[in-house]
Image (spheres, helix red, strand yellow):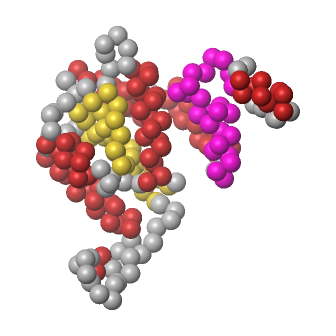
Amino acid sequence: KGALKNLANEKGYESFVVPDDVGGRFSVLTAVGLLPIAVSGADIDKLMEGANNMRKLVKSASFDENPSMQYAAARNILYRKGKSVEILGNFEPSFHFVGEWWKQLFGESEGKDNKGIFPASVDFTTDLHSMGQFIQDGSRVMFETIMNLEQPTDDFTIEEEAVDTDGLNYLAGKTVNYVNQQAMMGTRVAHTDGDVPQFVVNVAKR
């Protein structure tokens, strides 16, 4: 139903069913999200297989083996201790829109009855100079969840420059992923020293 459905019927375009009982923030795993994901070249069969495997895990595993329940419990503990802002950070550009989706999921789900944890996302190292400063030394109302990509698929080695204008030739022979990992560790240490609780979600590969 709606204007696009009417247009599809009028023009004879193929259309896909979007369930009425699936809210917008959950629709990424319906045709709403799967069609553009498929067009991008991603394997949506593997995506759905992974989603189904995680669904089975979080519905059946005990607390000790259930990452979803552990995450929810830890967030609730921090919320009760006055941590009302959660920062989702990453050091991998391909995670940017995961952060955007995450903000929609948590903002719409928890922002009710004058309660809830405010969700914000940052892209490191881009946001380190601005948001990173606030996280490290600003008001102590927040905690961080860091998404860490363990095995990037498009890593490359930094070459030595003939003229070392920037003084960065000490990085020659290192990979971009190595530099990112060092930046992440340094950031985590700085924010820990700033009394910012942290969670880390390790993603094996993209």
Q: Which residues are magenta?
A: 18-41
Q: Can you name the residue that lies furthest to the bottom here?
A: 162
Q: Position of residue 168 (x, y in %)?
A: 26, 76
Q: Which quadrant of the figure has residue 53?
A: top right
Along the line of sight, which residue is nearer the eye, 2 or 169? 2
Along the line of sight, which residue is nearer the eye, 65 or 123? 123
**Which residue is drawn at the image coordinates 46% and 60% (left, top)?**
151
Q: Which quadrant of the figure has residue 111?
A: top left
Q: Position of residue 114 (x, y in %)?
A: 31, 13
- Looking at the image, residue 84 sits to the left or right of residue 35; the answer is left
Q: Position of residue 30 (x, y in %)?
A: 65, 31
Residue 170 visible in the current orientation: no
**Which residue is drawn at the image coordinates 68% and 33% (left, top)?**
31
**Which residue is drawn at the image coordinates 33% and 80% (left, top)?**
172
Q: Can you name the residue that lies furthest to the top here?
A: 113
Residue 94 higher or lower than 112, as above or below = below
Residue 157 higher or lower than 130, as above or below = below
Q: Which quadrant of the figure has residue 35?
A: top right
Residue 21 among those drawn in magenta: yes
Residue 148 visible in the current orientation: yes
Along the line of sight, which residue is nearer the eye, 29 or 166? 166
- Looking at the image, residue 86 sits to the left or right of residue 105; the answer is left
- Looking at the image, residue 10 sits to the left or right of residue 140; the answer is right
Question: What secondary structure predominates along the stretch shown in magenta?
Answer: helix
